[in-house]
Image (cartoon, rainbow, N blue to C red):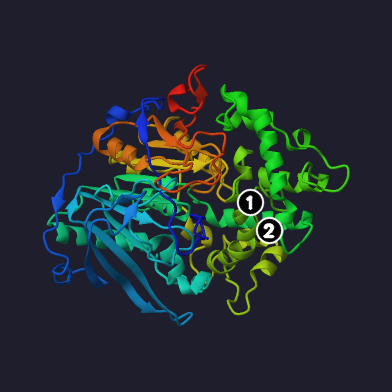
Amino acid sequence: MTSIPGYFRWALPAGVAAAALVACGGGGGNSAAALPQLAPASPAALAFTCAELPGKLTGLANTTITSSTLVAAGTLSVGGEPVPEHCLVTGSMFNRTSTVDGNAYAIGFEMRLPVVWNGRFFHQGNGGIDGSVVTATGQFGGGPLTGALKQGFAVLSSDAGHAGALGPTFGIDPQARLDYGYQAVGKLTPMAKSLIKTAYAKGPDRSYFGGCSNGGRHAMIAATRYAADYDGVLAGAPGYNLPRAAIASIAGGQLYASVATNPADLSTGFTTAERTLVANAVLAKCDALDGATDGLVQDVAACQAAFDLQRDVPSCTGARDGTCLSDAQKTAIGKIYSGPRTSSGALVYASFPYDAGVSGSGIPFWEFTAPLALDSGAVGMIFKVPPVAAAGFNGPAFTLGANIDDLVAQVNATNATYVESGMSLMTPPTPSNMSTLKNRGGKIIVYHGVSDPIFSVNDSQAWYQGLQAANNGDASDFARFYRIPGMGHCSGGPATDQFDALSALVSWVEKGDAPGALVASARGAGNAGGVNADVPASWSATRTRPLCPYPQVARYNGTGSLEAASSFSCK
């Protein structure tokens, strides 16, 4: 599973991104002059050696420091580049034994403190159901070319309050649910800032939060519940409606099972050849809408109007052979893309746009494995009230036998033991209210792959539209949203998925340089940050494209190489 970043990858972080800014589009917002301008961070060096640090950290409340070790330059690398010398501090917070399930719990963490520090703190939100203290390199979605630690940030990573060996059964414990949902962030943040203040004899001048998938959800939590503590937030594919997304995935699993030739293998409901067929049909209708026939659908909205699954994909007149879809398949797949609904017709989560990335290598895991192996346990034990019993739990049976109406009700339910519902503890209280972050001069950048099969780009788009409505129709003075055509969940797909939104965020927060387009590159053969196997052979291995701030679209200028971002403009 190492190639699968993000949501429910229990022990691994989301992928890492890299890139540059170009002057293209964006707009300055409707009240930029009225917002505070935060000062830049100033560097510092460690005030003590790593060996001395534990003795200086005795005043951290509810915290146990277990080690402090000097890590030589080059021991870690990001994108093939060495990470500078730093001090690794490990520890835990709020160690306890549950009175509900009898298991031991704590918020495990590590902090990596550069010997030469840039004055900034980066809280790394990890993917999946957490449960593992992932290496605190400060990586974020897309292709791994840079990270916060490499750039000189002090970086924190945690397990969000439970051990990975428990899997989703940690959700039986009410406090572990709350820590995973949002409280671990609230407990870790002041501890980390205090630790930094001791280590460098000054606290962080600027604080950032970043992550993709569930890490993006954590970022949205930071931007709402803990906005006074963070100056910049970078949220990739944020599953801020995660319980509903998981139920929609379960409903999708049921739909695939209904058309699978082998009910034990959901992928036989929509095979690789059939997914490629649909991808090619989407390209035939949509590729040229942005002025360039290049294997990328930039004009997402126009594509949804132009493409019709029933009309544009051949219907089988005989046996399925990869060149057609059966009528039953078209009905099932159409329901998945339009968004599964309850028996009353209410949308469970969100719709998904048709995009060429449906053929990507990361799609099958999320479409055919996650509903049975991951979403079942998450909904059953972490999100719903009451949870199912852990003993004898069977994920596939739970998914295929679930009543969707019941699950929607149960993730909104509470009882005397579980006093917050799954939706309450997992989601920002009011996602469109980021006034605290805005009014103190903070900024947020959200990015999302158009072909993400588990968290829909349409859900992130709806969030941004709500944010605009809550800010007199324009939130661009403190928030930007980027759609990434072809990209799947956090990375991959036939896409230019390598970009550096963190540097753009820092420049915006600390210099007032509002981001326009971000230049993103493909990760073909020879890429130092890792090769994306979904990059088509017909593309340049280093193809670049501008990622445009919503609602702008990258359009071909009419001349110039189809492999160069400079041939496109955000309009």
Residue 417, visible in the rendered structure? no
Q: How many marks?
A: 2
Q: Mark 1 points at which residue?
A: 348
Give the residue type at disc 1: Val
Q: In this view, does 223 lie to the left or right of 440?
A: right
Quadrant of the rendered image containing residue 512 = top left
Give the residue type at disc 2: Asp
The circle on residue 403 is none
Residue depicted at 60% across the width and 50% down the height: 363
Quadrant of the rendered image containing residue 504 = top left
Residue depicted at 55% across the width and 57% down the height: 243
Residue 246, visible in the rendered structure? yes
Name, please, the residue furthest toward the top.
558
SS label for mark 1: loop
Name, please, the residue furthest toward the front.
526
In the image, residue 353 sits, relative to residue 345, either above or below, namely: above
From the top left corner, tell me how far across and down residue 184 is, in percent: 37, 63
SS label for mark 2: helix
From the top left corner, tell me how far across and down residue 189 is, in percent: 29, 58
From the top left corner, tell me how far across and down residue 205 is, in percent: 20, 47
Q: Is residue 289 left or right of residue 222?
A: right
Residue depicted at 32% across the width and 63% down the height: 187
Q: Distance between the residues labelled 1 and 2?
A: 9 Å
From the top left corner, tell me how far across and down residue 424 is, in percent: 49, 58
Compare marks 1 and 2 and give the one earlier in the sequence.
1
Residue depicted at 54% across the width and 70% down the height: 415
Q: Is residue 142 left or right of residue 412?
A: left
Q: Name the residue under label 2.
A: 405
